[in-house]
Amino acid sequence: MAPTRRIIVALLLLALGVISTVSGRLTQTNAQPGNEAVEKSPWGEPVDGMACRLVMQPRYVIGQAITAVIEVKNTSDKKRYLAPMLDPRTTRHLAVEISGPKGKVRQTNEEQGYYWLGETHFKPMEPGEVKRFEVADLRGYFAELNALQVYPLGKANAVTTGKYAAQFRFRSPPVPARFIVSKTFINSKEVSQTKDVPKEVTAGQWAREIVSAPVAFELAALDKDDLVVHEWGVFTVFNDVKYANINRKEEWGSLPSFFYRQFPKERLRWVPSAWDKPIVYFYAKNTPMHVNVKVTFAEGAPVVWWPAVASPVEDRPYATGPDPRKVQAFRSLIWDAWIGDKVPDARGQGPLVKVEDFPLPADCWLQQARLPSASRLTVIGNIEGPGKVRFPGAKDRSETERFLYYDGLVPAPDYLRCEKIDAKAVTLRNRAKFDIARLFVVDRRAKETVGFAFVDGTKQPFRAGTSLKIDLRPVDPEDWPFTGVKHVRQALLDAGLFEAEADSLLKIWDKRLLQAEGVTAFHILPMTEYDRMLPIDILPAPVARPVRVGIALHPHVEIEPVLTELVSGLIRQLDSPKFVERLAADKALVEIGPLAITMLQAELKKGVSLETSRRIQAILDRVDTSSWLDFPAPAKKSAK
C-alpha cells in the first residue's frame, strides 16, 4: 500500500517590513506630521484676530495615510468664542481644497443632513490658544487619492502621482439669539427648548472666514524599500491521498479558541448587513499604510487563520436561529489592514491610535513567530460569541499582530518518491515538474546515530523526472542538530529570508525537520510553485516581488513495504493487554500521519475486535479531517 500524504501549511507573513541593507533591521516612519513640518507650515492671514494653518508632511507614498493637522489660532489679545467645527466632513464650516496634476480633487466624504448648534458647540479661546483637529487620513475624504477602493472591498484604484497643493477655508457661524438645548415633537410638531446666551459669548463671538496658506506635498509611487513582503511556509507531504493535512484536526483544535476558522465549527468575524469597516494592517517604511491582502487556495480550502479577515464574514443581520447550512467551503481569505505602531481608529476619524500586540496564550507556538523587527499589522475582529448584538460594531475589537497566519487543506503535490534505501544511502526520484534545489535528508532510524546529506541544486542539479542516489554522511550525535541547523539556516538565507525569520522558522520546526524518527527529506520550493498553490495578491502592490520560501517536508521516506509493515504492527498493538503499549501505539500512529489514517480506515472495514475498533475510531476522531470538504452536489433544478 502506498504511503498517504499530508501537507501542513503553516504560512506566516512575517517580515513585511523595510530592511536596512546594512544592518538587516526593519525601520519605519510614522506619517503624523512632525516638528519640522509644523515649523515650516505658515499661518494664513489673520481675520479679526483669528488665523489658521494646515500642517502636512512634504511627501507621502501610495498606500500611506495622508495625515494632516488643521489648526485655528486666536491671534488677538482677548478671549473669543467660536464653533471649532474642524472635521473636513463638515464642509459648511470647513472646506478642504486639494489640487494636483489633473486639477481639483473631488471630495467624496461629506456630512449629510441637518444638524443644529447648541451651547456646547461654541468654545472659548484665550489669547494665543490653538484649537486643532488631527486628520488620520485625508484619503478618507478624497477617495481619488486612495490606491485601495474601500467599497467594493479590495478593488484597486489608479492614483495619480506627482505634486499636490492643499489648503482650507474655515467659517464659524454666528452665535444665535438663544441656544437650543433640546428638540422634541408634540402632536407631530417640532418643539425646541432654548436658553439665554451669556452676554460674554455674544460680545466675544467670532463669525468670520479665514483661509490657510497653501501647503505643497508630493504623492510618490512606491519604491522597492517602501513595502517589503516576506513569507515562509512548511508543507508536510505524504503521497496518495486526496487532501493534505487530513491528520491536523488535533493541532488546529489546540490553537486558541478565539482564532478564526471554518472547520470543524465556523467562527467568522461578525459584520451585520449594510455595515462595512475594512481595516487591516501590514508592514511598510512609511506608516501608517493601508493594504489589502488576498490569499487564494487554488484547490482545497483554508481551515484556520489569525488575525481576523475582512472576507469571508458572518453578515446575517441578527443571528437568532441555527447556523445556515454550509453549501461549500470558501477558498480565499482577504485581510484589509493598517500597518504601523499608530493607525486610524475603527471609524477612521480623529488622531492616530497607538496599538499593541494582541495577547496570545503563553503556550501558543505562534508566540515564537512574533519578530520585534517586523511591523505591526492591525485588523478589526470580534470577541467570541454568537452575533446577536443589536448594534453594528458592538462586538468589534482591534487585533494587532506581527504576522498573518493561515493553514488549511490543499491537494498534496507529488514531489519525491523513495526508490531504494540502505544503511548508508537513499535513492530518491524527483516526480515534480521542476528541478529540486537545496534538498536535505536526515536519517534517524537508529537511536544514537544520525545520517545527513545536503544536495546543493546549484552545484548538483536534481532534475525533474530523474532519480538521484544520495550518500548519508554520519554525524556525531553530540553535534546534532546543530550541524543540520547551520546548513538549513544558510539555505533559508540564500532563499531570501532575513536572519530573524530563518531563526524563527527553525525554532518552530526544528523537531520535525531535524529530529523526527525515521528518514526525513525536505527541500525548498521554487517561488513559482508556492504561487501556484497559494496565489497572493497585495494592494498596493510592492515594487519588489514578495519573497515566499516554502519547504516541502517528507517524513518517513522509507520504502513503502517497510513503513506499511510498521503501521500494521502498531495497529495490532492497539489490542495489547498492556496499557503502556496501547498508549505508545496510539501516539505513534498519530505522528506517522495520513498513511496510518488510511490504513486505520481500511482496518475498520475488515471487522476487528470491539476494543481495537473503539481505539481506531478515537484516533480518527482526533485527527482525521478528510470529510470536511466532501460537500454534497448542488440540488438539480426541477423542470418547469
Image (cartoon, rainbow, N blue to C red):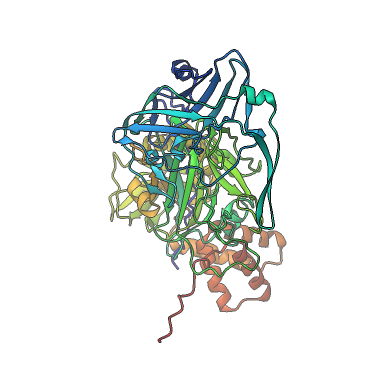
Name the foreground residue: 304 vs 28. Answer: 28
The residue shown at (55%, 40%) is 401
The number of numbered discs placed on residues in the rendered structure image is: 0
The residue shown at (47%, 55%) is 7
145 vs 273: above or below: above
Q: Residue furthest front?
A: 177
Q: Quick check: 439 left or right of 171?
A: left
The residue shown at (64%, 26%) is 202
Q: Position of residue 238 (x, y in %)?
A: 45, 58
Name the foreground residue: 249 vs 126. Answer: 126
Q: Position of residue 196 (x, y in %)?
A: 71, 33
Point out the image quarter for the N terminus: bottom left
Q: Position of residue 295 (x, y in %)?
A: 43, 51
Q: Residue furthest top?
A: 77
Q: Position of residue 45 (x, y in %)?
A: 45, 18
Residue 577 seen in the figure: yes
Name the foreground residue: 434 vs 556. Answer: 434
Dividing the picture into quadrants, the one containing residue 498 is top left
542 vs 304: above or below: above
Residue 423 seen in the figure: no
The residue shown at (46%, 28%) is 28
406 vs 567: above or below: above
Q: Quick check: 99 left or right of 125?
A: left
